[in-house]
Amino acid sequence: MQLRPGAEMNPDHALLVDLYELTMAAAYFEHRIDCRATFDLFVRHLPAQRAYLVAAGLNAALGYLENLRFSDADVQFLRTHPIFRTVSPAFFDYLREFRFHGDVQAVEEGTLVFAEEPLLQVSAPVLEAQIVETYLLSVIHFETLVASKAARVVHAAKGRPVLEFGTRRAHGPEAGVRAARAACVGGCAATSNVLAGALYNLPLAGTAAHSWTQVFPSERRSFEALLETFPNSAILLIDTYDVLAGAEIAATLEKRVPGVRLDSGDLLEKSRLVREILDRHGQRDTKIVASGDLNEYKIEELLAGGAPIDSFGVGTDLVTSRDVPALNVVYKLVETETGGVAEPKTKFSEDKVYWPGRKQVFRFSEGGQYHHDLIARAAEEHPKASALLQPVMREGRRMAPALTVEEIRQRTLANLACLPEAYHALHQAPAFPVEKSPALEQLLEEIRVKHFGVEKASHLGGGS
Amino acid sequence: MQLRPGAEMNPDHALLVDLYELTMAAAYFEHRIDCRATFDLFVRHLPAQRAYLVAAGLNAALGYLENLRFSDADVQFLRTHPIFRTVSPAFFDYLREFRFHGDVQAVEEGTLVFAEEPLLQVSAPVLEAQIVETYLLSVIHFETLVASKAARVVHAAKGRPVLEFGTRRAHGPEAGVRAARAACVGGCAATSNVLAGALYNLPLAGTAAHSWTQVFPSERRSFEALLETFPNSAILLIDTYDVLAGAEIAATLEKRVPGVRLDSGDLLEKSRLVREILDRHGQRDTKIVASGDLNEYKIEELLAGGAPIDSFGVGTDLVTSRDVPALNVVYKLVETETGGVAEPKTKFSEDKVYWPGRKQVFRFSEGGQYHHDLIARAAEEHPKASALLQPVMREGRRMAPALTVEEIRQRTLANLACLPEAYHALHQAPAFPVEKSPALEQLLEEIRVKHFGVEKASHLGGGS
């Protein structure tokens, strides 16, 4: 059973914006500026520890755009706030009727993306396109961040299931739910987050806490009791007092033990000793789950050392993307359109120049493996490549029902299988080649010349 | 106006738990184990970059405990889930009637805390105390994480206002709201998150985006337009094309310019040049706001270099606590009580031993400055010290109305003023002295001997 199918975590969202989205909206309104605007949402640079990203969060983004409304209380709050006292009442009437009527192009969730490639392109009346900036960045950023981390952890586990156990250390309860979804998008096999399981139909996994064992007069009795209630799924946590003694107790129970969990100490050494104890007592089918501040680097090391671990519970490092807790994700105006005339736009702030105009990302493959990408103007045609940006919303309505997370996960795994092995390296992976089309380069140069004149333009160098 | 006073972001929370909380609850229920249990919520170690923590998240935690209910749909989801098929129907009837009836002791939000000091102590029937673990950890951890980071940033800014601008890079929308609150608890002057402002009555701040300037035919016209709508509060973003040219335009507008924002390049050099341009044109009251991947280290450096910056917009590093994106926060059973007989509990997993029994944290001061802390057994008396843990909830009901964030912020600032200067150092601050009472040491030793016998106990070393 899935709880409220299609539901999303959307905490009370119309005011969930940076103030400047609403002050700019008010000023656009007052100046009757109603051009159509196109924004690209992309990650500016990839950090050294990420050779690729796994796109995620689109479902939440589209759900937000479809349902965005300002309640009467929201409007009243803004109308009476001192910051808005110079704004005319008509703006608040506008907010009361506000709907998002824009078009969205996006890469599918589970798509691998690289620096400067738009994950999302929003075209809408400028007020609408501006107001949705904060929320879109927030959900796309966070789910992409965690899905990308998950893909690395899953790769390191070499086919052994990775269980997402991080809710308690995620950045608040909602982050725990989103992280669980994103982890499964990135390839994790299950989550401990029950709400995420219920909302997104994800497999659930869990073991027991130390407190369970502590409450009982003896460790043996605590194990027996858990097995009595959950004979098929109980995973016994055996390190409350002494992990080897705990393993001996688990191995000599009368009942079959589905699994044991190790959560402390040297997991390589302890997993070997525990496996030995279990095997010696004929408990060869008992699985060993390891946990305790794991990440892709530690898992790689454990498996390189031959640790007999069957699955990994990964928490904090996964849900906070601890080595890279944020990506340089931005939402930039690339085109305005007034009376049918499109005008490509960019900015030239130091180190922050971006490619103007509507774009398409073309992915070229050879022999079933990704070869290189080309960021190009939207109208270009490259028939040998796949075009990653596809229409997903028209005039504020989704163009297709949401995929299930399991469908997305399968696509992620298929996409990852197309990425050549070199880019999967956890350390010092090379940069996947992403080229810009000559037409795009030329457009940037034209805008530069138009803005600064020829002389200044020549000093500014490349546009990336 | 405050939107829904006292409201909290509590996304649909009864299922927002790790699966094992519910499987353990089911197994306790099936085995009729209904002792009272006391859990400590604390941070095991402080990372090198944090000499102290600022406690936060208590309001959300208490709101959760007061309102926790399983809906019919929640119960139906669990009852029909394969994991629970071996659990008797009576457990689901129990969940339907579930309420939290426990007692909570806690340190006030804004209190400075150190490693191993309980932020929260929950005493309740064991099922109830167990089920609430995940959510309590989640909200206390994240708000404490951000409040602690904020205090460092605010310290580095030496009295200049710090504005929280991070929602877009927080870990999802709700994290943005919680981070805004926590940032203000930690001393920030304002936030850009409108919903957080509305929920918690926080001062709002904002400027403008590059897109605002790009939409207009000229930068000058974009500045004028923003000033027409917001004559008293507009902050002009002057680096869309060229920051010094932008400053010249801002400085020569007919209207008074409340402020300008720099968001790229060398902020030290650029702020000086911009100040010079503004002053040269008589715009001495125009404030300079700086932003762009700032944190406490960069702010310290900018101010050490004499940057004429009036306030700092801090985003990603603050709301993700980028250098320390998670704390080692745990929730550990320390006592069970059956038929009025209390039994202190602990576990002995490698490197993860903790002090058993109910505790109190005593803070000793000298000359108005914090001198040292003492973690002691709850019944100890140390009349010269303040006892940090105080009752905040009895039988599931709050004992006092929530403080406002502004009240908490004032307490935080007062507490920080009592922390000797050495512990404020951003780099290599010494560890604040936290002692354990002899009675607490003795209790741990007694449990160790009882569990392992005398010989083994002597090998285990200290308990921290």
Image (spheres, coloured by chain):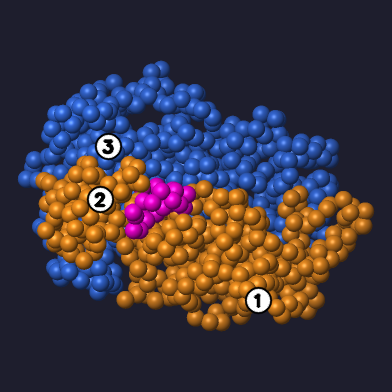
Chain colours: A orange, B blue
Q: Is residue A313 magenta?
A: yes
* In the image, residue B372 above or below residue A35: above
Q: Nearer the viewer, residue B242 or A324?
A: A324
The mark found on residue B353 in the picture is: 3
* In the image, residue B419 above or below residue A155: above
Sooner in the amino-acid sequence: mark 2 or mark 1: 2
Same subunit, tags 2 and 3: no
Q: Nearer the viewer, residue B66 or A73?
A: B66
For the residues labelled 2 and 3, the Cα–Cα distance comes to: 26 Å
The residue depicted at 31 percent of the width and 25 percent of the height is: B435
| Residue type, label 2 | Glu
The residue depicted at 23 percent of the width and 29 percent of the height is: B459
Place of residue A122 in the rendered image (x, y in percent of width and height, measured from the top left)? 64, 71
For the residues labelled 1 and 3, the Cα–Cα distance comes to: 55 Å
Same subunit, tags 2 and 1: yes
Q: Which residues are magenta?
A: A292-317
Pointer 1 residue: A386
Residues packed near mark 1 inside 10 Å, few (<14), some (14 to 19) or many (20 plus): some
Pointer 2 residue: A276
- Extreme left residue here? B339
